[in-house]
Amino acid sequence: MVSSLDGFIAKKDNSVSWLEGPGSVYERGVSISDEEAAAFLKTIDCYVLGSRTYEHALQLGWPYGDTPAIVISNRKWPLASTRKSVEFYSGDLKTLVDTKLAPRYRNIWLVGGAMLSQRFLDLGLVDEIKLTIAPVLLGGGLRLFGDSVAEQRWNLKDVVAYKNGFVELSYSATGA
Ligand SMILES: NC(=O)c1ccc[n+]([C@@H]2O[C@H](COP(=O)([O-])OP(=O)(O)OC[C@H]3O[C@@H](n4cnc5c(N)ncnc54)[C@H](OP(=O)(O)O)[C@@H]3O)[C@@H](O)[C@H]2O)c1
C-alpha cells in the first residue's frame, strides 16, 4: 500500500493525484523501468480487494489486467462485473484464505483498502507488509491503520528509497 507521510491512503474525496504529484528528487534513490515493474506484477498470482477499493479501481481504469481478483463484499445486490477474472466473495476471511486462495495461489496480493487490510491483519492472515511512504502530507483522509489493529511486532526485511522520494518498507510477520 502507499501511504502519505501522515498515514493516509486516500484523500477524503478519493482522489489519487497525490500519488503522482510534482516529485522531490532523491539523488541516491533507485528507479525502476516499466519492464521491471511489469516483471514484478507478473509474480502476483491473485489480488484481493475490498468492495470500495474495487469500485475505485473500476473508476480509475482497471489496473490488474487478467490476473484473478477476488472482491470481498457482503452486499446483497450483485456488483456488476465486466471482467471474467473478477470473482466476488462474501463470508469468513480465514475460510477464504484456507479453502479458496492458499490451495490455488502462491503470491496473493491484498490490495486494500484500509477496512479489509485491518481485518486481515487482526485475523493474522498477512505474512508480509509492503508499505510505500509518499513524500506528501495530506492533512486528512482515510487512515491506513485505524484504531482496530491490535499491537503486533513485524520484522523489517528491506528498505528501498526511490529517486522520486518514495520509500518502500518491507516487513515479514514474526515467525514467518
Ligand atoms: N493508497 C493505497 O495504496 C490504497 C490501496 C487500496 C485502496 N486504497 C483506497 O482506499 C479506499 C477504500 O478503502 P476502504 O477502507 O474505504 O474500503 P475497502 O477496504 O476497500 O472495502 C471495504 C468493504 O469491503 C467489504 N467487506 C466485506 N467483508 C469485510 C470484512 N470482513 N472486513 C472489511 N471489509 C469487508 C465491505 O463491502 P460491502 O459494503 O460491499 O459489504 C466493506 O464495505 C479507496 O479510496 C481506495 O482507492 C488506497
Image (spheres, helix red, strand yellow):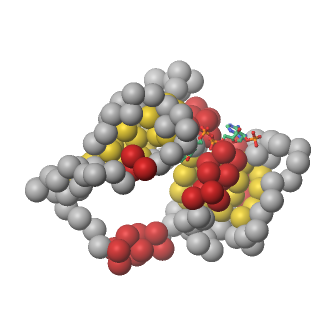
Horizontally, is 137 left or right of 24 in the view? right
Residue found 72% across the figure and 64% down from its top: 86
At which x and y percent is residue 161?
22, 52
Q: Depth check: give the residue in front, 170 or 132.
A: 132
Residue found 59% across the figure and 64% down from its top: 61
Extreme-left residue of the structure:
27
Tell me which corner region of the image, top left, top right, bottom left or bottom right, holds residue 46. bottom right
At which x and y percent is residue 68?
65, 68
Tell me which corner region of the image, top left, top right, bottom left or bottom right, holds residue 88. bottom right
Extreme-bottom residue of the structure:
35
At which x and y percent is residue 141?
49, 31
Residue 29 appears in view: yes
Q: In which quarter of the image is ligand 1?
A: top right
At which x and y percent is residue 40?
41, 69
Horizontally, is 63 left or right of 17 in the view? right
Q: In this view, does 136 lie above or below 109?
A: above
Residue found 52% across the figure and 62% down from its top: 107
Q: Depth check: give the residue in front, 166 or 15.
A: 15
Horizontally, is 56 left or right of 88 in the view? left
Please give the count of numbered marks on the rendered protein: 0
Extreme-right residue of the structure:
76
Tell me which corner region of the image, top left, top right, bottom left or bottom right, holds residue 37. bottom left
Q: Is residue 159 above or below residue 120?
A: below
Residue found 24% across the figure and 55% down from its top: 164
Horizontally, is 74 left or right of 122 in the view? right
Residue 128 appears in view: no
